[in-house]
């Protein structure tokens, strides 16, 4: 069980770093682009299908993507039950 809990915590950290990096412009080349590409490929299989079910919430001229929040809540519930 400890390995599963560790992997869930690691996924939460990866998701958090992806969210924070999405707030900053990243050029198409360089180290940060590679890091963001890796984080994207690790998190998008979970976020993509959820995003297609759950549309973004419009807040004036900004759209808020709720899929990372739902994933955070889901993983935290799962960790509470398992760990």
Image (spheres, rainbow, N blue to C red):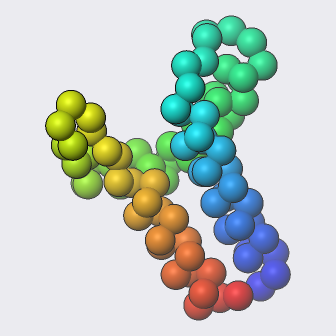
Residue at figure coordinates x 70%, y 88% from the top left:
83
Residue 58 coordinates in the image, percent (x, y): 19, 43
Which residue of the protein is positioned furthest toward the front in this rendering?
60
Q: In this view, does 18 lie above or below 25?
A: below
Residue 72 appears left or right of 63: right
For residue 6, above or below residue 24: below
Q: Is residue 65 left or right of residue 53?
A: right
Give the quadrant of residue 53: bottom left
Judged left or right of residue 80, residue 50 is: left
- For this orientation, the residue located farthest to the right is 2
Does residue 8 sit above or below 36 in this rendering? Answer: below
37 vs 12, nearest the viewer: 12
In-front residue for pair 2/27: 27
Tell me where residue 50 appears, x and y as whole percent. 35, 54
Residue at left offset 18%, top offset 37%: 60
Residue 34 % position (x, y): 71, 23
Q: Indicate the quadrant where residue 39 lies.
A: top right
Q: Which residue is drawn at 21% across and 43% down?
A: 59
Of residues 7 and 19, the one drawn nearer to the viewer in this rendering: 19
Question: Where residue 41 sits: x, y (%)?
Answer: 60, 37
Please count the marks in the image.
0
Tell me which residue sits at (61%, 11%) in the image: 27
- Is 76 left or right of 48, judged from the image as shown? right
Q: Is residue 41 visible?
A: no
Residue 33 seen in render: yes
* Image vertical order of residue 77 relative to residue 13, above or below: below
Quadrant (top left, top right, bottom left, bottom right) of the N terminus: bottom right
């Amino acid at each position: 069980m400890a390995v599963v809990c560790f992997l869930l915590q690691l996924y939460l950290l990866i998701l958090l770093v992806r969210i924070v990096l999405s707030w900053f412009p990243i050029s198409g080349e360089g180290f940060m682009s590679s890091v963001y590409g890796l984080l994207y490929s690790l998190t998008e299989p979970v976020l993509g299908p959820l995003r297609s079910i759950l549309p973004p919430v419009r807040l004036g001229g900004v759209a808020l993507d709720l899929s990372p929040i739902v994933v955070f809540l889901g993983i935290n519930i799962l960790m509470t039950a398992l760990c």
